[in-house]
Image (cartoon, rainbow, N blue to C red):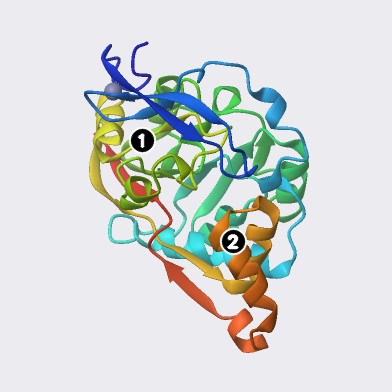
Amino acid sequence: MNCPVCNNSESKKMLIRNQETGSSEDRPALMCKACKTIFAEDYQKDRSGLYSENYAPWSDDSGYVAESKTNTFKSQLSLALPYIAPKGKKLLDAGTAKGYLMTAASQLGFDVYGFDISKSAIDSAKKVFPNKVFCGTIEDADYKDSEFDMITTTDILEHLVDPHKFMEKASQLVKKGGLLLIITPNSGSITRKILRKNWYQYKEEHIIYYNKKSLAHLLKKHGFELIFAKANTKTFSLKYTYEYVKKYKIAVMGSIFAKVFPLLPEFVKNASFSNPMAGEIIALARKT
Ligand SMILES: [Zn+2]
C-alpha cells in the first residue's frame, strides 16, 4: 500500500492500539520507509459514523475548558506573530469546532472565519461569530482564491483520508506570502518512541500520523515553504486533565492521577501548566 503522503510503495508493518477506549486490541498500521509517516492499514475505511454529534471534542464544555482551550490557542498563534501583523488580517480556521481558536485569534486582532463538519459545534460558534462560520468541509468553502492571509488547522490533518485534496484547496484560499499553521500528532516524537503501541495519540479516528519530514513534503508539494516545525506545547489545568483522564480511561497514569487529584488543594487544581510532551508537532509555513 502506498504512503498517503509521499506515495512511496515501501513500508514497514507495525501494530498500534487505540488508547481512548482502553482497548486491548492491536490494529495493523504501516510506517512509510521514505518519510516515516505512520498510517492505519485501513485508513481509507469510511469512519464518518465516528463523527456523530456526540463526538467528544464537540461535547458540552464548562467555562474552564473553554478558557483553557482559548489560552492554548492564543499561545500557539503567538508563534506566528513574528511573521504576520494580525490587525485586520483574514484568518480561516479549518475544523474550528466551537470556535475557540477563532476567539483567541480575534483577541489578537485577526478578522476570523471558520468551518466544521459538526452542526452542533458550528451552532455554538455561530452565537459568537454570526455570518463568519459554516457547517461543512474545506471543499464546501465558498471563498475567493487568495482570500485569506492565514489558515489554521489544528487536530484535523490526522483525521483526513486525503491530505492532498485538503492542502490543494488550502493553497488556493491563502494568498501568496500568506501563512498556514498546522498542529497534528508527531510520529517522530519522543513520546511515541517511549510508549510504542500505547502512544496516547493512537485513536481510531486518527488515521495518518505525520512528522517533520512528511509535513515538509506535503507542504512543499502544495506550494508552501516550511518556516518552522517543532514540538507543540499545550497549556492545561490539572482540573482539565482530571476531566480528560476520566473521559478517556487512560491506563495506569490516569488511574493514579484520578485518585490523587481530589486530595489536592483548590489553588493547585486550578493552576495552569505547560506540557511540552503533548506528542504533537506545530508547523508554520508560507505560501510561495
Ligand atoms: Zn511516505
Q: Nearer the viewer, residue 146 or 188?
A: 188
Circle 1 residue: 210
Q: What type is the residue that disc 2 sits on? A: Gly
Res 109 visible: no
**Is the CB of the residue bearing disc 1 within 8 angstroms of ligand 1?**
no
Q: Nearer the viewer, residue 16 or 24?
A: 24
Q: Nearer the viewer, residue 84 or 59?
A: 59
Residue 53 lies, in percent from the top left, at 77, 37
Can you tell which quarter of the image residue 216 is in? Answer: top left
Residue at 56% x, 43% y is 19
Q: Quadrant of the C terminus?
A: top left
Q: Quadrant of the N terminus?
A: top left
Residue 140 lies, in percent from the top left, at 60, 23
Q: What type is the residue that disc 1 sits on? A: Tyr
Going from N to C along the chain, the mark reached first, 1 or 2, is 1
Placement of 206 over or under 196, stated as above or below: above
Residue at 59% x, 84% y is 268
Residue 204 lies, in percent from the top left, at 58, 32
Badge 2, how many Cα within 10 Å: few under 14, some, many 20+? some
Circle 2 residue: 254
Residue 60 lies, in percent from the top left, at 77, 54
